[in-house]
Amino acid sequence: MTSNRRPSPRSPGLVVMAAAGISGVAGYVVLVLAARALTPAENADFLVFWGAVFAVFGVLTGLTAEITRAVFAARHSQSPGPAAGARVVPAALVLGGAVVGVVGLSGPLWAPALFGSEWLPLLAAMVCGIGLFVVHSALGGAAAGGGQWSGYAVLVGLEATTRLALCALVALLGGEVLGLAWGVCAACGTWLLLSLWPRYRRLWAARGDVDRGGLLRRMVSACTAAGASSLLLVGFPVLLRVTTSDEVFAGTAPLLLAVSLTRAPLLVPLGAYQNVVVTKVLTQGLRALVGPTRLVLALTVLGAALAGLVGPVAMRVINPDYRVEGVIFAALTVAAGLVALLTLTGAASLALDRHTVYLAGWTGATLSALAVLAGPWAIEPRVIAALVTGPLVGMTIHLTWSVYGGRSGPGSVRVGRSPSRPRTLRAGGAPAGLEENR
């Protein structure tokens, strides 16, 4: 029976942010381990693999966001009885299986150029990781949409800490790029361990608010937009490689590491928290973005100042051969803040069921960044200009279309509206029954 108690609006954010913080620290340490264990050239190769794998993982986070929306909407519809929509996890497996097939079958066309002589075992690790991450993403969306925030947090945190443990073991044993790659990807299977508990097995039965066809269409749209976003977020080394000569790219490991280090404090927690943003926008409209936006802006200003002072020293501690100026660190932190704001506006567009706007914003951001990267300037100005221009273009698209995108209807800012369910959510607060199922 659904409880009528109104939950604390802070509790989901706190538990998710705690897990995201653990995930961010774990990711930091993996990058540091790789920088210390590998030569600069080997680390550049590892960062390309890391970027390629997490770019595809980023595509699959579209599953998490859409499943969060669909399950949340189904739970809070006015229809009596259980949700009548499709089961979300099996539907995600259909789409995820297609992604695995496309990456695996197309690999011989692009992997040799991207991964070098060890492209086949690296491609195998990548395909294995993608297959495991499909289920991870689907279960995470089902948990978030069902209000099971502590279960979602454990899923996020355990995957990251397992990745750290495996990569630390590989580094301790003297493993190289291939060993670290398998450690990164094998961690995506932590849901197998969690599935020993009934609360996680029950997630396989979660249903959305639409039939399978409608759900798959929304998943495709969300994943397409997430793919554009992941190229700009974690696939940036891939974009840089395809727009940079081999001679110049061989020396980009310090700059790429600086990009990752300045992004992680904001974007890793936000990657997990955006599912909370989806549920809040569903109940509160775009005003739900005010608090997170202020926090991101404050952290960006503070982070830029600290990064400019501490970044160069920290870089030399990680690897004495790495040199990046403080002003570059500060500028990259500002760029990371803009990408974080773009992530918020994208999550809002998705929550409002404006999947086309979500896709257009991230596509515009990625294409504009790629266009800047293809320019004739030196490597540092190109990278900074690309990471600033892309988010500004994407945010403009998201906010313009979401606020002024036409008549009230699907995706409007009106609280509690969705094209697939009646208006059921209370304005200005969470719906009844959002508290975690126990």
Image (spheres, grey):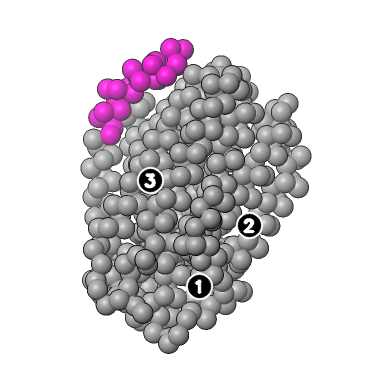
Which residue does the numbered mark 3 point to in the structure image?
A: 20
Q: Residues within 10 Å of mark 1 (few under 14, many from 20)?
A: many
Q: Amino acid at mark 3?
A: Ala
- Which is nearer the eye, 327 or 156? 156
Give the x, y percent position of residue 122.
68, 34
Q: Residues within 10 Å of mark 3 (few under 14, many from 20)?
A: many
Could you tell me which residue is drawn at 63 percent across and 57 percent down?
96
Q: Is residue 251 left or right of residue 386?
A: right
Answer above or below: position of 402 versus 38.
below
Give the x, y percent position of residue 10.
25, 58
How far is mark 1 from mark 3, CA to CA? Answer: 25 Å
Asked if marks 1 and 2 touch (Cβ < 8 Å), the reply is: no
In the rendered structure, does residue 311 fall within the stretch colored magenta?
yes
Q: Amino acid at mark 1?
A: Gly
Task: Write the start and end of the magenta stretch as one range.
Answer: 303-327
Which residue does the numbered mark 2 point to in the structure image?
A: 96
Which residue does the numbered mark 1 point to in the structure image?
A: 208
How far is mark 1 from mark 2, CA to CA? Answer: 17 Å
- From the image, give the main secondary structure of the stretch colored magenta: helix
> Which badge, 1 or 3, comes first in the chain's sequence?
3
Is residue 391 in view? no
Answer above or below: position of 340 versus 224.
above
- Regarding mark 1 in the picture, which secondary structure is present there? loop
